[in-house]
Image (spheres, rainbow, N blue to C red):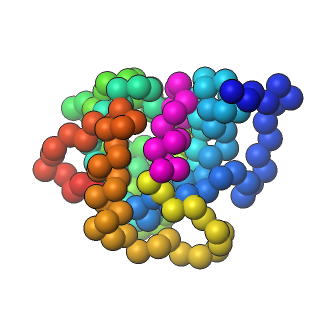
Amino acid sequence: MTVNREGLLQQPGQGSSYWMLGDLYTYKAVGEETGNAYALCEVVMQPQSEIPPHTHTHEDEAFYIQEGEIEFQLDEQVIVATAGSFLHSPQGQLHRFKNIGSKPAKLLSWVTPAGFEKFVVEVGVPVTDGVAPPPAISSADIEKVIATASKYGVVQINSPHKTF
């Protein structure tokens, strides 16, 4: 385990970035840098992009909305979160979220403890060109996400909402 004892600094545009099902995930901190205490990711969600209902069995997840309108479901409660909103979803809580706006939405996502970032690295596509549009989503991409999720303690919940 490598912990950066001098602190971390990620300038705008820095971090390891991955496309996952059309959305951009840029890691500002990963477990190897935080003693596995947490991972922090900036997510840019495309309009109408949705993460289906699921639970995490390994970590808590928290969100801070920077731009846009994102509809969240936390158990049975549904809310619209806008810039400046903060949400916390503890381990085991059913949650889903969707960019309900017509423009990309931006949010920060923390997971504690770290580890979920390895899922994104495994199923995502590394960003090699920071200005290229998101790659097309294939059925193979969706199948890979679904097949890999349980390895990282993510349990997809069937629902009438649009899924991957």
Quarter placement of the C terminus? bottom left
Examine the rendered structure and indicate whether residue 42 appears above or below residue 153.
below
Examine the rendered structure and indicate whether residue 115 appears above or below residue 135.
above
Q: Residue at x 86, y 29 (%)?
A: 6
Q: Residue at x 65, y 52 (%)?
A: 16
Closest to the observer: 88 or 139?
139
Residue 2 horizontal/vertical position (percent): 73, 29
Residue 57 horizontal/vertical position (percent): 35, 26
Examine the rendered structure and indicate whether residue 21 appears above or below residue 138.
above
Q: Name which quarter of the figure residue 150 lies in.
A: top left
Q: Residue furthest right?
A: 6
Instruction: Please provide the residue range marked out in magenta.
Output: 110-122
Residue 42 horizontal/vertical position (percent): 59, 48
**In the figure, is residue 33 to the left or right of 31?**
right
Closest to the observer: 97 or 30?
30
Q: Is 116 a magenta residue? A: yes
Q: Is residue 146 visible?
A: yes
Q: Residue at x 61, y 52 (%)?
A: 26
Residue 157 horizontal/vertical position (percent): 20, 40
Closest to the observer: 84 or 23?
23
Quarter placement of the N terminus? top right
**In the figure, is residue 9 to the left or right of 114?**
right
Q: Residue at x 29, y 50 (%)?
A: 146
Q: Is 141 a magenta residue? A: no
Q: Name which quarter of the figure residue 155 lies in.
A: top left
Q: How many marks?
A: 0
Q: Is residue 65 visible?
A: no
